[in-house]
Image (cartoon, grey):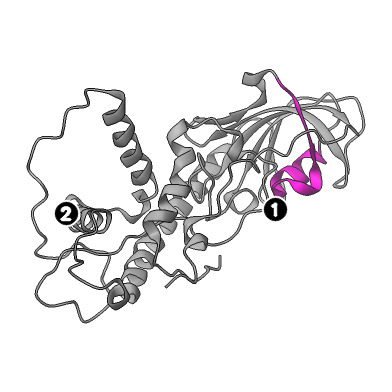
Amino acid sequence: MTRKPFSMRAALAALLVFAAPAAHGATSTAATPATAQPGTSPSTPNQPSPSAPSSAPSSAPSSAPSSAPPSAPSTAPPALDGDQQKTFYALGLALSQSLTRLDLQQSELAYLVQGLQDGVLKRDPRVKIEDFADKVQALAQSRLEVANERETAEAKAFLGKMAQQPGAVRTDSGIIIISQQEGAGRSPKASDTVRVNYEGKLADGTVFDSTMERGEPTSVALDQVIPCWTEALQTMKVGGRAEVVCPAELAYGEDGRPGIPPNSPLVFDIHLLSIGDTATASPGQKGYHPPLMQQVAGLR
């Protein structure tokens, strides 16, 4: 898969925008199948660097921690006595979700926290972001390449396991369809609008969206959904129900979505109710934010 170039300037501001939906829980209409087609760039962060060793590294940082990082803060964490303190703590958790794919170590966080504090509190910076932009980019890309390899291997193993389930049919594109109930009506075309009840899960079983839980079937246009849905729904007939396993490249790819990590295969339980209804919803559009690496592109 190709990758879009990453550049870095207003990362913290972008992180706040990107991470906000994740703080509201996993189940969200911001990550459902009718979103725009996935991109190919990773959707993870990075952060400007840190405190100030006396000499800057002369080459791009490696994915390994530096040999002599400052000690992480040893003070006890502050008590969460009220909603305001808990809200700020939740904000920190939201930010952390956008940083997890960088696989930061505790010693590296000491640098990051120092830079965060100096930037937010408007202290004199100990380094210039411009001087380290290329190194930040190299560090982020190096860590993300490792994350992509790991996630791709995990997804491949999961898809292989699902393809072995009784009744599983794997299409040429890699979609796995396990029929739960055969329909008696006609099959939709790619240009049709369909009314469906569905539930979407991650590979670990986490539900990220469910019209079944909401008790609200929805109508979607098949030419406006992820490619997996466009293809899989055309194999079903009205009244049919199937478990559809989508490879990441036919869902949200390396970008992910709020509630859906990058490179995630997705499992949908789909009940096709009817064909021809006017689309009443376009799940995933409201509250959707572009991946972080797109938000900060060009802001160096």
Instruction: Choose between 239 and 215: the one closer to the eye.
Output: 215
**x then y, percent, for residue 295:** 50, 60
Of the 4 image quadrants, the one containing the C terminus is bottom left
Amino acid found under the numbered disc labelled 1: Ser
Q: Is residue 41 above or below residue 59?
A: above
> On the image, numbered disc 1 is attached to which residue?
173
Which of the 4 image quarters holds residue 269? top right
**x then y, percent, for residue 208:** 55, 32
- Horizontal arrangement in the rendering, residue 216 relative to residue 254 (left or right): right
Q: Secondary structure at mark 2?
A: helix
- Horizontal arrangement in the rendering, residue 31 relative to residue 206 (left or right): right
Image depth: mark 2 or mark 1 in front: 2
Of the 4 image quadrants, the one containing the N terminus is bottom right
Q: Residues within 10 Å of mark 2 (few under 14, many from 20)?
A: some
Residue 222 part of the magenta-drawn span: yes
User: Magenta residues?
Assistant: 216-235
Disc 2/disc 1 C-alpha distance (Å) = 45 Å
Instruction: Choose between 201 and 80: the one closer to the eye.
Output: 80
Instruction: Choose between 1 and 75: the one closer to the eye.
Output: 75
Q: Could you say which disc has been placed on residue 110 in the image?
A: 2
**x then y, percent, for residue 95:** 36, 45
Residue 20 part of the magenta-drawn span: no
Mark nearer the N terminus (2 vs 1): 2
